[in-house]
Amino acid sequence: MRKFLVVLDDSRECLNAMRFAAMRAQKSGGGVTILSVIPPDEFNHWIGVGDIMREEARERIHAHFEVFAKWMRDKQNVDPELVIREGDPVAEILAYVREDPEIGILVLGAAESKKGPGPLVSHMTKSSGSLPVPITIVPGDMSKERLEAIT
């Protein structure tokens, strides 16, 4: 089964990427994998404190995932899977795309800012020539109705 890989982070544009991935998966008979990457610099503390912070980050990711997963199951009839990794976000996304042969499309949300689409989109588009899958970039300010119309 072809899966859409979408990145879960704290950005606002992540919401539209989630919506797009779920709608496209539902309409094409595919699946959704939600990848969240915990940057290593969040845990540069004493070992005990770092472990607690790591667990809190995982709990926060699971809570956000459950909100998106419930919507995907209830509204789109898609049951997403969650993958959590630790490391540099760009490196971990690239590694996961190469590791999972079922990933067919990487879906990213672009920021509405005049400063650019965001660091993740900027980095991933630079690597797009060597990726084994295409990237779909979803505008962060696109309405839900417009997303429904184009998917």
Image: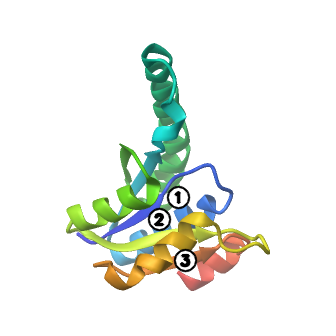
In the picture as drawn, the residue positioned furthest to the right comes out as 114
* Residue density around tag 2, few if under 14, some if 14–19, many if 20 or more, within 10 Å: many
Give the x, y percent position of residue 43: 49, 30
Which is more toward the observer, 25 or 42? 42
The residue carrying mark 2 is 22
The residue carrying mark 3 is 137
Residues tagged 2 and 1 counted as in contact (Cβ below 8 A): yes
Element marked by disc 1: helix
Which is more toward the observer, 138 or 119? 119
Q: Is residue 95 above or below residue 1?
A: above
Element marked by disc 3: strand
Residue 28 seen in this snapshot: yes
Give the x, y percent position of residue 54: 46, 28
The residue carrying mark 1 is 75
Could you tell me how many numbered marks the image carries?
Answer: 3
From the image, state whether disc 1 or disc 3 is nearer to you: 3
